[in-house]
């Protein structure tokens, strides 16, 4: 899923802090603006990924935020599908059934079952990469 959340950047003890008020507890820091924004994207994706995986409600992004005098408003795009692909590389064991004759042919050909299943699922779901 793709999301866009407003965030507030602020200076904190020589670092750039980022808070995402719509996502409770979602904040991070960076040594400069670029690092802070990269860290914020990561923090938002991690927060949303956890919520999605645990069937928790996803807060609606605010249209605007009230910011202080030394704060900067920005929007941060997040993609939990891309985040999940990059970070959730756990192998899951699946039990499945195929016809005996097909299993025999595949074993004879030393077919890599797991790779074939993964590629078949990616093709079926139209997932690239």
Image: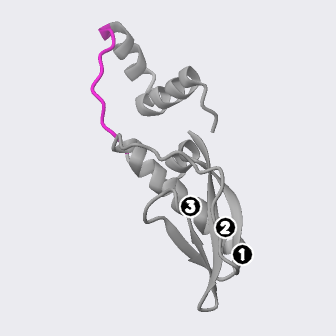
Q: Is residue 40 above or below residue 92?
A: below
Residue annotated with mark 1? 33
Determine whether label 1 and label 3 are within 8 Å by CB. Answer: no
Magenta region: 91-100
Relative depth, front residue between 82 and 56: 56
Q: Horizontal and vertical percent for residue 67?
A: 65, 70
Residue annotated with mark 3? 42
Residue found at x 59% / y 51% = 62
Q: Earlier in the sequence, mark 1 or mark 3?
A: 1
Residue farthest left in this picture: 95
Q: Is residue 115 above or below residue 39?
A: above
Label 1 secondary element:
helix
Relative depth, front residue between 66 and 117: 66
Q: Is residue 71 left or right of residue 114?
A: right
Residue annotated with mark 2? 37
Q: Nearer the viewer, mark 1 or mark 3?
A: 1
Determine whether label 2 and label 1 are within 8 Å by CB. Answer: yes
Q: Is residue 84 left or right of residue 103?
A: right
What separation in Å lies between label 2 and label 1 (alpha carbons)? 6 Å
| Residue 89 in view (yes/no) | no
Q: Is residue 48 above or below residue 96?
A: below
Query: Quick check: is 95 in the magenta stretch?
Result: yes
Relative depth, front residue between 79 and 21: 21
Predominant secondary structure, magenta span? loop
């Amino acid at each position: 899923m793709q999301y866009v959340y407003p965030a507030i950047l602020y200076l904190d003890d020589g670092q750039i802090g980022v808070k995402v008020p719509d996502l409770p507890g979602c904040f991070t820091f960076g040594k400069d603006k670029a690092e802070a924004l990269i860290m914020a994207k990561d923090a938002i994706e991690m927060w949303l990924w956890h919520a999605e995986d645990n069937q928790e409600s996803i807060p609606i992004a605010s249209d605007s935020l009230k910011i202080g005098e030394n704060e900067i408003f920005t929007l941060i795009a997040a993609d939990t599908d891309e985040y999940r692909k990059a970070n959730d590389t756990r192998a899951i064991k699946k039990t499945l059934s195929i016809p005996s004759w097909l299993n025999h042919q595949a074993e004879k050909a030393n077919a890599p079952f797991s790779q074939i299943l993964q590629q078949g699922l990616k093709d079926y779901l139209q997932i690239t990469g």
